[in-house]
Image (spheres, coloured by chain):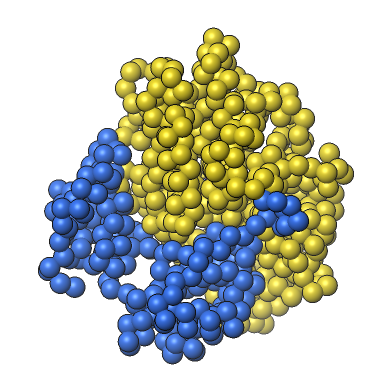
Chain colours: A blue, B yellow
Amino acid sequence: MSDTNTFDATDLAEIERLTAKYPEKQAAVLPVLWYAQDKFGHTDPSVQKLVADTLNIPEAHIYGVVTFYTQFYEKPMGRHVLDVCTCLSCQVCGGYDILQYLEEKLEIKAGETTPDGEFSIQSVECLGACGYAPMLQVTNDKFVNHLTHKKIDKLIEALKAGKKPEFESNRMPQHENGSE
Amino acid sequence: MTNDWKSYNPLLLPAIKDLHEITVYEKNNGYQALRKILKDQETWSPNNVIGEVKAANIRGRGGAGFNAGLKWSFMPEPDGKPRYLACNGDESEPGTFKDRKIFEFNPHLFIEGSIIAAYAMQINVIYVYIRGEYRPFLKKLQKAIDQAYENGYLGKKVLGTDFSVEMYTHMGAGAYICGEESSLMESLEGKRGYPRVKPPFPAQRGLWGRPTTINNIETLANVPLVMNNGADWYLEIGPDTHPGPVLYGISGHVNRPGVYEYPAGMDIMTLINDVAGGVRGGKKLKALIPGGSSTPPLRADMLEGVSMDSDSLREAGSMMGTAGMVVLDEDTDMVDLIWRISHFYSHESCGQCTPCRDGTGWLEKTLRKIKDGNGELRDLDLLLAICHRMEGRTICALADAAAWPVRYSIDRFRDEFEKKCRKTVYAVA
Ligand SMILES: Cc1cc2nc3c(=O)[nH]c(=O)nc-3n(C[C@H](O)[C@H](O)[C@H](O)COP(=O)(O)O)c2cc1C
Ligand code: SF4
Ligand code: FES
């Protein structure tokens, strides 16, 4: 987006710490890209260049990594990215219905961002929450499970008000009467 | 064994409040297996630990079911240079959501198991690879790792002995293929996750060219159980050839979906009807995918007397996989379902091998055509021919994983596929 992306001293110290976990610097590419995406909101070519220069690794390599992994955003996304799982268990439990409801509600299609830049929607592969289908993930972070239209309405309202979802613990049904 | 499941007390995920806190874990016999081993290294030499784990026959819980101790024994003699343990928490096979339970509810059991594994293979660095989507769970694991460092189970001179071991977490960023062990290593090295050609196997040339062992999270969580109680005790749980507790992830059309812990070898109908509360809305059962999306679907009438262990499932015509069971009711559109699975594999193929890159794409396209009502009967033969040209011809097993569900569904639900195809003037082979 801009050429003004930089890492400050705190960032560089953190990157140093991340790199120290590995015998070779290149291994820190994923963690540093994550760090950059947390800071800048995406890993577009300007961020890729910054990461490349910081780690002293060819830009082409960084580009290759960013384009391989779906969670790195190659361009700026909405403030909240809603990843709706439509894979196997979610498919048979209404994942596509949830996706369609969201598309109609936000008036965009999967893969698009609302004009005000608030929301992006994506249809994604299994997120490892199959028993709590249908579900979605908010901006690579919290899972929202057992979705209904009502739950979606509430979620959108909360996100608009700047309230992020809490971590939802799914206890084992086996223990529901126990103490776990 | 399967009759007394109601009285079974979970071992991997027991109902103990706040077990994820190290103090609670320690109070409940936690880190005792590690202590026992490190205190008496004469009895518990690395080789003896490997021997015990091998005798227990912990079948790898990542999908392939390989004896964990046997895999450990493939590591060459130490040569003074680094060697690695990579713990596989990529958990991306559709239908699978069990390892996250360990991260959330009993992370120290897994950490203790990994430390014992590292000791047994004389490894000093452990990486835990976690899929990027599990960030909230990674935070929970990281907290547990920090506690283990504070209490002297990780770091320099573990419990005052000469054994030192570091444990680092590494987060993926959205790529199913990175669960494949050699792709995982590429990803850990900071690259695109392209699986490597084998041989050389990871024990010979793994991370940064050094000997490496890769184990699933649940596999490693079984290790302290074995070391605390002995291989003989472990072998008493579940079937002879597939012992131990298993985390069954049950999803789809059941009343009580979720992760359940019972011995391996549970009767499938008991799991569906009694454990998971039966098929939703009083509907009839149509099919079961027993162990994640790549395991061949079984028709309801094929499930009688079949149990969740590798022998029984092989006989029935499927596989144990990750024990991620997807239950499908009578209203399920199998063509739609198999198309979606094919879409998944087409999306996740890394693209290195032509049979896989092109094959998964053609499976998806052809199934989409049939699902949209534009298919012809000969397309079913085309699908089978594509499967045939994929299976066993690629660098990793993703191509096989993509072909099996298609091949076996056409075989087992052929009438449904045929019904979706238009009448055709061509003769069918
Ligand atoms: C395409 C593909 C995806 C895989 N994904 C996973 C995974 O997400 N988690 C896992 O533990 N193993 C996965 N595996 C299996 C690993 O390659 C490896 O066998 C396993 O992690 C070894 O651990 P175990 O012996 O303890 O099961 C996958 C294999 C293939 C071919
Ligand atoms: S089989 Fe598919 S996923 Fe595996 S290496 Fe080949 S192209 Fe990549
Ligand atoms: S299929 Fe949606 S979370 Fe697994």
- Residue B307: image location, x then y, percent: 78, 46
**Point 64% across, 35% down: residue:** B28
Q: Is residue A110 above or below residue B106?
A: below
Q: Hey, which quadrant is residue A176 in on the image?
A: bottom right
- Residue B375: image location, x then y, percent: 59, 78
Nearer-the-camera pick, B216 or B227 = B227
- Residue A10: image location, x then y, percent: 20, 53
Nearer-the-camera pick, A139 or B242 = A139
Residue extending furthest toward the top: B42
Q: Hey, which quadrant is residue B199 in on the image?
A: top left
Nearer-the-camera pick, B66 or B424 = B66
**Point 46% across, 32% down: residue:** B151
- Residue B423: image location, x then y, percent: 67, 82
Q: Is A65 on the left-hand or right-hand side of A144?
A: left
**Point 78% across, 67% down: residue:** B279
Q: Is residue B332 above or below residue B400?
A: below
Question: Quick one: quadrant of the N terminus of chain B?
Answer: top right
Is residue A57 something that shows in the picture? no
**Point 17% across, 58% down: residue:** A7
Q: Hey, which quadrant is residue B335 in on the image?
A: bottom right
Is residue A31 something that shows in the picture? yes
Q: Is A68 on the left-hand or right-hand side of B410?
A: left
Residue extending furthest toward the right: B3
Question: Quick one: quadrant of the C terminus of chain B?
Answer: bottom right
Q: Is B307 on the left-hand or right-hand side of A84?
A: right
Total numbered circles: 0
Nearer-the-camera pick, B270 or A146 = A146
Q: Is B278 on the left-hand or right-hand side of B135?
A: right
